[in-house]
Image (spheres, rainbow, N blue to C red):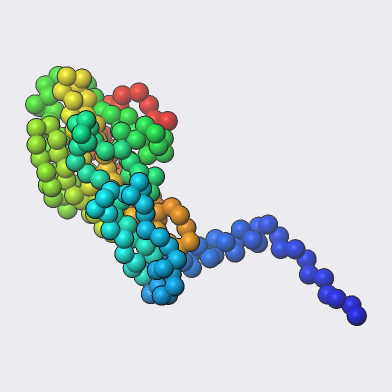
Amino acid sequence: AIRPVFPAPHPAAASLALAAAAAAALCGLFLLGPPAALAESVPPASAEQRPSDAVAAFSGGAEKRRTTATGLTKAGRLHNCSSLENCASSTAVRNPSQFAPPWTFLPQTDSAEVAWRSLAGVVKGLEGAEVVEEGPRYLHVAVPGFPKGVDDVEFLMVEESGIVTFRSAGREAIFVYPLQQPVSDLGKNKKRLDMIRETLGWEELGGRY
């Protein structure tokens, strides 16, 4: 008997099939409810990957994890960025794709007080901004995230150095099964930070990686 021989799939066709599968999964975020087995098959982030108060919940075929940590560390600095969150920060020196250099306000003023008032005015004026915490040279506001949710934006001034450090991150990250990276914010956090700095007329220290 003659057995039919089927040609091996072209690599490009395999890539298209994979992309189609990922797109279908992403559509499930908005259109479909998750199968019962799906919720059991994807483990929540470990304690090392997320803050201790993190929560995970499935919504529309995707896992939503609270990934960001706000406030200051024991060393009095802003928290680093996790690889499992949409984040941009001057503290993310170990994650080059999330790193942005701290700012200096000296091109505009040598007064820390004047610089802080200017920064606070611009940040509080962001669309939908709500002040979460404000202290001596520390400011934390919550703003609408992309495509939805909340972004936490924080600033910490180091007066003696004339610089401002910052961190902007989505409060929750969405993971579409079976992908292991969060749905991208399309650089929204970095773009927001750049807009704030440019509005103030401040400069970055050094350059981006």
Q: How many marks?
A: 0
Could you say which is closer to the camera, residue 198 or residue 43?
43
Asked where in the image residue 5 lies, by quadrant, the reply is bottom right
Q: Does the image show residue 108? A: no
Asked where in the image residue 18 lies, by quadrant, the reply is bottom right
User: What residue lies at 35% left-to-right and 23% top-to-bottom?
Assistant: 206
- Along the horizontal axis of the image, is 187 left or right of 77? right
Would you place residue 206 above or below residue 57 in this image? above
Would you place residue 200 above or below residue 160 in this image? below
Return the x and y of residue 177 as percentages of the image width and height.
45, 63
Would you place residue 6 above or below residue 72 in this image? below
User: What residue lies at 40% left-to-right and 37% top-to-bottom?
Assistant: 95
Quarter occupied by the C terminus: top left
Return the x and y of residue 87 as percentages of the image width and height.
33, 44
- Along the horizontal axis of the image, is 114 left or right of 155? left
Quarter occupied by the N terminus: bottom right
Q: Does the image show residue 78? A: yes
Return the x and y of residue 108 as percentages of the image width and height.
18, 23
User: What residue lies at 78% left-to-right and 66% top-to-bottom?
Assistant: 7
In the orientation shown, which residue stands out farthest toward the bottom?
A: 1
Could you say which is closer to the camera, residue 71 or residue 118?
71
User: What residue lies at 8% left-to-right and 26% top-to-bottom?
Assistant: 113
- Along the horizontal axis of the image, is 153 left or right of 112? right
